[in-house]
Amino acid sequence: MYGALWRVLPGPWWLRVLILLVVAAAILFALITWVFPVVDSLVEPNVTVGSG
């Protein structure tokens, strides 16, 4: 999978690494901005602190 992705990307190795870093940063930004808040609103933890 990663080898196929590496072969599809254009340019020399440093440009491929730069493209992958930008894509990873965009995915992380999207997760933090949209996905995690939605999941947080759906999950209600049942945690009690100091019981006992």
Image: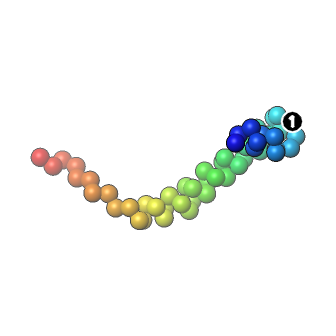
Between 26 and 6, the residue placed more toward the observer is 6
Instruction: Please indicate, yes or no, whether residue 40 appears anywhere in the rendered image.
Output: yes
Q: In the rendered view, does 40 fall on the left or right side of 52?
A: right
Residue for point 70% across, 40% down: 2
Between 29 and 20, the residue placed more toward the observer is 20
Give the percent coordinates (x, y) of residue 15. 82, 39
Give the percent coordinates (x, y) of residue 34. 56, 62
Instruction: Tell me the amino acid under the disc marked 1.
Output: Pro
Q: In the rendered view, does 14 fall on the left or right side of 20?
A: right
The answer to whether 5 is drawn above or below residue 45 in the figure is above
Instruction: Please indicate, yes or no, whether residue 18 appears anywhere in the rendered image.
Output: no
* SS state under label 1: loop
Q: In the rendered view, does 14 fall on the left or right side of 34?
A: right
The answer to whether 7 is drawn above or below residue 42 in the figure is above
Task: Tell me how the rendering is colored.
Answer: rainbow
Residue for point 81% across, 34% down: 14
Residue for point 76% across, 42% down: 4
Task: Give the quadrant of the N terminus.
Answer: top right
Q: Which residue is mark 1?
A: 12
Residue situated furthest top in the rendering: 13
Give the percent coordinates (x, y) of residue 48. 22, 52
Give the percent coordinates (x, y) of residue 12. 86, 36
Residue for point 50% across, 58% down: 36
